Amino acid sequence: MNVLLIGSGGREHALAWRLAQSPALHTLYAAPGNPGIARHATIAALDPSNHRMIVDFCRRETIGLVVIGPEQPLVEGLADTLRAAGVPVFGPGKAAAQLEGSKGFTKDLCARANIPTAAYFRVTSKDGALAALDDLGGRAVIKADGLAAGKGVTVALTRAEAEAAIDALFADGPAEAVIEEVLEGEEASLFVLTDGNAAVAFGSAQDHKRVGDGDTGPNTGGMGAYSPADVLTPVLEQQAIDTIVRPTIAAMAAAGTPFSGVLYAGLMLTADGPKLIEYNVRFGDPECQVLMTRFTGDLVALLLAVAEGRLADTAAPVFSDAIALTVVMAARGYPGTHETGGAISGIETAESTGAVVFQAGTREADGAIVASGGRVLAVTGTGGDISSAQAAAYRGVVAIDFPTGFARRDIGWRAIERAASVVATGEN
Ligand code: AMP
Ligand code: GLY
């Protein structure tokens, strides 16, 4: 079968790497792709926002499955256009993609379906926002509605911080926003594949959103991740599936907009159990890199079963017992204005240590790889425990020569501290 993968980041490199290992695959195409993806796929000169162009390509190249990596084309309805043209597609349509595209939509759905999440107010004016802040006791999370790549969120622990965020949000007049209660706990991400009816867990991960060691500095798209997230114990995972994910899938189906694809639940593990922070309607980046490293099955067959609504008749996905950990190497200045064009070498050396190097923001210049984005590489290692997975990833990182880049040095620290405290107290 021929498969078309849409996207150009580290997540899509990981998908391409795993899709290319499927026995059923004939040719993998990718658009727009990147030099890492090009190691596994034929790059097609297609614009993902030109839906007609994508459908024509699928017909011409007899594409049997389209896998859509990023949220933007999903929110723009690319999956709907492909489905209408009879092309199997992994990823939700526009209506179901609102679970990520509109925070207000998701909060209202949670309220209707009694799904545990932070208390919230939807507001459209500064006065409304300030009133909501009063109701929440002066501490609040302020979120712009719509896709904001994780940057439209301020967790304000004081009234002054909250008011500054509200001022900034309404600086240009009315806007759609959600003001919500600050949840306390540790965060974990849960991935569930669903074809709209059946659902199957597809692993967990913990992301590192802040740019600096010790979780300091501004928020980013993610500086590293590991899987599984040990803090999400099997009991908590089941609780999250039963109280959050399944009711969401049922509510979407009942509304006539079934969700098909991967539902990525960002959870806060509070003293009262898991609560939903947000949904994403695609794999996480860099979470996908660690999930794909651990997934050992036939990815084309599995994603096609989701696309064709056959998940109930498909064997559950199989993962290796190893821990996978990925470290993002970013361009200096990220998440602010960052340098581009920085030289990168040593990818092969890094891979000879056993690490897998997924490329995110890279391009080819005169036969060499240079940085072209904020997050540039995701260097991934595996091990029998979290410390050896971390060591394996950093063996790869030190082998990379990227003078204008940087990486966090502590990816996995929460799990490593937990493992150390278990040893210290003799628990198991
Ligand atoms: P979001 O874009 O909704 O995922 O928010 C980005 C980040 O803000 C999350 O990963 C959390 O770290 C934090 N956050 C969002 N909502 C809350 C909340 N209600 N309580 C505490 N932290 C939150
Ligand atoms: N790493 C966070 C995300 O993909 O949204």
Image (cartoon, grey):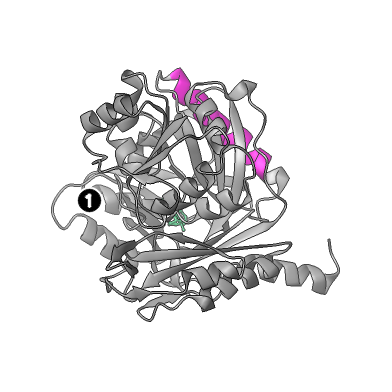
Q: Is residue 265 left or right of residue 88?
A: right
Identify which residue, 307 or 366, lies in the foreground.
Answer: 366
* Type of amino acid at the residue the image marks with label 1: Asp
Label 1: how many Cα within 10 Å (few below 14, some 14–19, many 20+): few
Q: Is residue 156 left or right of residue 426?
A: left
Q: Which residue is mark 1?
A: 127
Residue 12 horizontal/vertical position (percent): 42, 49
What residue is drawn where x is 36% and y is 29%? 93
* Residue 103 in view (yes/no): no
Residue 381 sits above or below residue 70 on the image:
below
Residue extent of the magenta highlight: 237-254
Residue 304 sits above or below residue 288 on the image:
above
The residue lying furthest to the left in this view is 172
Magenta segment, prevailing SS (helix, strand or loop): helix
Residue 51 horizontal/vertical position (percent): 24, 31
Residue 248 falls within the magenta-colored stretch: yes
What residue is drawn where x is 28% and y is 61%? 165
Residue 418 sits above or below residue 151 on the image:
below
